[in-house]
């Protein structure tokens, strides 16, 4: 008799506690191999193909496309052939398949495979006739109605330290929450729902908004929901301020043209602005920091992990260039190009979207001059760059047509005062107007 193995939604890392089923890559009755992707899910950070650690015949799937599942909930069951032991992916490392999720470090070029092949009659019959009790046991393990609230005494059903920290930082009593995970496990989503919930006195106001006929309701979940929560938290926690300045970018554009006329890879404007930013952060390190509310401390960070805004079909994402302070404009340009392509094709790993310490937002590509961007929590600042456009400008005492850009800096007023923020922005503008100024910092 084949052994029916249950494969649960694995821990996706990076603090992710749930995922939405986007597309099934296998059907009941399909034969799957070890490490074959079986489902494509969307987390709050990226699209991920989840490989199955067992080889055999799929006997059941749990959840329709569009369903959100918590980590640990059953995904599929696989009937492993008689006389063969389950072969987890961890045991198959020597074959090169690896035991990591697709999208978390495996080869992104590997296509998803859906196979319907002839099966040995004995195995097919055994799979179809898999013990009802086994499948019923798996179904019973699927998420059911929310568990009762945690009791006033005894252990709190929380596994993730990130969930505990989120609750502690925001004053949420975990014992008062109703866990939506397996066996009442409290998930990050439960804490975030408690933070979004109105105060008891205002509960009456928390009624669905009346919408006119023909209106469309779009659920705030997945990437869009994560963005909404992050921006709301930023506005809720960070006392931000914005300063801005117009700069003559004519010399910067001329320097870029000279670089690209020489042999070698092309250098993007974003890469030059990024190199200017890292030099400015070396002078004003308070803007490359974060605020630890639990310890009531400002934490200045040793490396610049530079995030940049990239628009995709799934919405706005912010990939992160690691150790940007040690990269040349050529290296920065190549990394921006690589991450942008991954973003457009939906192949960014969650690790590519986390850990940023400062964000560069080039909204000029949308044809606008200025903006007051919301800080990418838990960072302390963001530099916005408008379009570079010909404008009348006084240059060397004469009115001339120059290439002008508006720069805006939104910063956390807890980490520095206006003097540091203004000094940072003025230094960036000076480097844009006269790239030779940057040479003093290289």
Image (cartoon, rainbow, N blue to C red):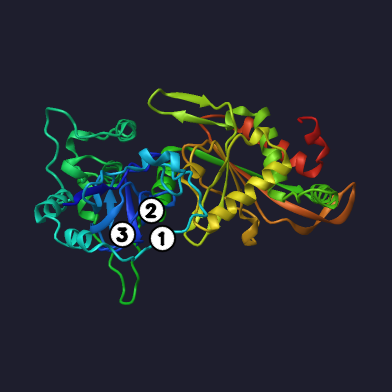
Q: Does the rendering let one see residue 423?
A: no
The quadrant where residue 304 appears: top right
- CB atoms of marks 1 and 2 within 8 Å: yes
Image point (14%, 40%), residue name: 149
The quarter of the rendered structure image containing the C terminus is top right
Label 1 crowd bin: few (<14), some (14–19), many (20+), radius 10 Å: few
* Disc 2: which residue: 36
Q: How many marks?
A: 3
Image point (40%, 43%), residue name: 233
Secondary element at tag 3: strand
Secondary element at tag 2: strand
The quadrant where residue 276 appears: top right
State the CA–CA distance, disc 2 to disc 3.
Answer: 10 Å
State the CA–CA distance, disc 3 to disc 1.
Answer: 11 Å
Secondary element at tag 1: loop
* Disc 1: which residue: 113
Residue closer to the observer: 170 or 17: 17
* Disc 3: which residue: 31
């Amino acid at each position: 008799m084949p052994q029916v193995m249950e494969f649960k939604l694995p821990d996706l890392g990076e603090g992710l506690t749930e995922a939405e089923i986007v597309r099934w890559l296998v059907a009941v009755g399909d034969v799957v191999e070890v490490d074959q992707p079986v489902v494509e899910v969307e987390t709050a950070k990226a699209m991920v193909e989840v490989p199955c650690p067992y080889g055999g015949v799929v006997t059941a799937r749990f959840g329709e496309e569009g369903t959100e599942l918590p980590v640990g909930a059953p995904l599929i069951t696989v009937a492993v052939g008689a006389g063969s032991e389950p072969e987890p992916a961890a045991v198959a490392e020597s074959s090169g398949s690896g035991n990591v999720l697709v999208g978390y470090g495996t080869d992104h070029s590997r296509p998803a495979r859906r196979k319907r092949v002839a099966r040995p009659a004995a195995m097919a019959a055994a799979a179809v006739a898999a013990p009802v009790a086994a499948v019923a046991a798996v179904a019973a393990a699927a998420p059911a109605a929310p568990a009762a609230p945690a009791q006033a005494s005894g252990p709190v059903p929380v596994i993730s330290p990130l969930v505990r920290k989120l609750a502690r930082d925001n004053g949420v009593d975990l014992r008062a929450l109703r866990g939506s995970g397996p066996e009442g496990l409290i998930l990050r989503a439960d804490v975030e729902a408690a933070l979004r919930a109105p105060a008891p006195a205002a509960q009456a106001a928390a009624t669905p908004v009346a919408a006119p006929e023909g209106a469309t309701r779009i659920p705030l979940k997945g990437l869009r929901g994560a963005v909404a929560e992050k921006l709301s938290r930023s506005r809720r926690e960070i006392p931000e301020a914005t300063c801005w300045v117009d700069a003559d970018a004519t010399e910067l554009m001329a320097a870029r043209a000279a670089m690209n006329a020489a042999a070698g890879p092309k250098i993007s404007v974003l890469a030059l602005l990024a190199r200017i930013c890292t030099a400015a952060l070396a002078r004003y390190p308070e803007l490359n920091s974060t605020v630890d509310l639990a310890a009531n401390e400002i934490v200045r960070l040793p490396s610049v992990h530079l995030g940049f805004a990239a628009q995709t079909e799934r919405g706005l994402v912010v990939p992160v260039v690691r150790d940007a302070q040690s990269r040349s404009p050529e290296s920065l340009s190549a990394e921006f190009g690589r991450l942008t392509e991954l973003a457009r094709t939906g192949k960014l790993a969650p690790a590519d979207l986390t850990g940023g310490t400062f964000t560069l937002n080039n909204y000029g590509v949308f044809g606008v001059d200025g903006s007051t961007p919301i800080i990418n929590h838990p960072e302390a600042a963001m530099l916005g760059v408008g379009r570079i456009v010909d404008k009348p400008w006084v240059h060397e005492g004469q009115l001339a047509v120059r290439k002008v850009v508006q720069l805006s800096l939104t910063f956390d007023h807890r980490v520095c005062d206006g003097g540091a923020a203004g000094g940072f922005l003025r230094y960036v503008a000076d480097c844009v107007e006269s790239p030779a100024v940057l040479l003093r910092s290289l």
